[in-house]
Image (cartoon, grey):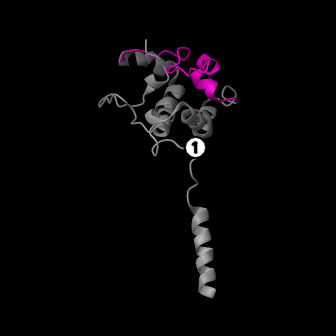
Amino acid sequence: MRSSSILLVFTVACVSRAEKPPAAPGPPELAWKTMSRDQRMTYMEKVVVPEMKPLFVAIDPKRFADFGCRTCHGASFDDKTFEMPNPALLKLPATPAGMIPLARDKGPWLDAMTTRIKPKMARLLGLAEYDVDHPQPDAFGCHGCHRVE
């Protein structure tokens, strides 16, 4: 009798320590490109926005206090097309040389985008992160959100 009580307590303790299931089905269990529109909307609302908001708030707490779908999708949030890349976001230079002034003028932003935001978004979408030295057609990079000049 006592050993079954110990087993029950141990089992409950292990289950309570287990990772919580995701708030909505998505990558890697369900590939982004195979998800329906409704699944994508739910995943973005329940998983992507809550995971990405702290990264943006860390850059600028006031500007991103109301972080949500519109932050990245802009006007396409309002018309429900969710167009990406978003034409209203900063357009990126097409060449490495063009990135030099951007790095000088927006260094902290560029650092946050390349070291925290882009890798997290790639992971959340279940995609490889774009690597300029080893480009893959379906990899997620800056061009996933920003247009290139």
Q: Nearer the viewer, residue 76 or 57?
A: 76
**Residue at image coords 58%, 43%:** 24
The residue wearing badge 1 is: 24
Q: Quadrant of the N terminus?
A: bottom right
Is residue 80 a member of the stretch shown in magenta? yes
Give the dominant element type of the magenta stretch: helix, strand or loop. loop
The answer to whether residue 67 is magenta is yes
Quarter of the image where the C terminus is located: top left
Q: Amino acid at mark 1?
A: Ala
Name the residue: 62% across, 40% down. Answer: 46
Q: Which quadrant would residue 129 be assigned to in this image?
A: top left
Query: Which one is in front, 141 or 22?
Result: 22
21 over 136 or under it: above or below: below
Q: Position of residue 90 (x, y in %)?
A: 52, 16
Residue at image x 56%, y 56%? 19
Q: Is residue 93 above or below residue 65?
A: above
Farthest residue in the top direction?
Answer: 149
Residue for point 60% across, 83% down: 4
Secondary structure type for disc 1:
loop
Classed neighbour count for the residue bearing mark 1: other residues with Cα under 10 Å, few (<14), some (14–19), many (≥20): some
- Residue 38 percent coordinates (x, y): 57, 33
Report the number of numbered marks: 1
Magenta residues span 66-95
Relative height, residue 108 to residue 147 (above, below): below
- 93 horizontally vs 132: left or right: right
